[in-house]
Image (cartoon, rainbow, N blue to C red):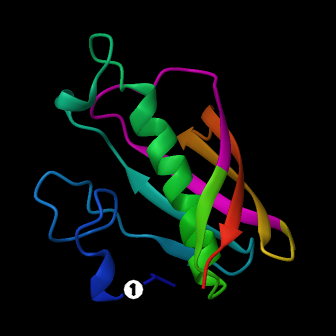
Amino acid sequence: MELNYSDEYQGCFVCGNENRQGLKLDFIYDEINDEIYSACSFRDYMQGYERIVHGGFISMILDEVMAKACLQKNTPAVTARIEVRFKKPVYVDEEVIVRGKILNTKGKTIHLAAQCVDRDGEEKASAQGVFMRVD
């Protein structure tokens, strides 16, 4: 099921349709695995080393997919902490899939996990996040 977000997110660099330089990603809810996912690729202006996507952009999409997992549960939340582990480079124009899911919640604290894999399922990066529920 594709997720639709209200107009307040249209300027978002990751998912906003009105951000000219943004990624304009669509996020989908996988009911079977209770996770959010999206496919994306990065443009050449997003590279660090030649043809390798800067780790900040990878961190950004891992963070975003975890935020969308919170929104799927009608729980707006912001990032309190994120730890990213990079395993293999993501290359400019390479399509990757990001997945995120809630692991557990306690009060206002939400623990999440995210993963970035290539089309063959090989892990490129992963993240653990702690989000705080907002009112």
| Residue highlighted by disc 1 | 4
Point 37% across, 69% down: residue = 26
Residue 61 versus residue 11 in the image, above or below: above
Of residues 24 and 132, the one drawn nearer to the viewer in this rendering: 132
Residue 54, quarter of picture: top left
Residue 96 in percent (x, y) is at 45, 43
Span highlighted in magenta in the image? 81-103
Residue 109 versus residue 84 in the image, above or below: below
The verdict on residue 102 being magenta is: yes
> How would you classify the magenta stretch by its main secondary structure?
strand
Of residues 26 and 118, the one drawn nearer to the viewer in this rendering: 26
The C terminus - image quarter? bottom right
The verdict on residue 10 being magenta is: no
Of residues 130 and 88, the one drawn nearer to the viewer in this rendering: 130
Three-letter residue code for mark 1: Asn
Residue 116, quarter of picture: top right
Label 1 element class:
loop
Residue 82 in percent (x, y) is at 65, 44
Of residues 22 and 108, the one drawn nearer to the viewer in this rendering: 108
Residue 105, quarter of picture: bottom right
Tag count? 1
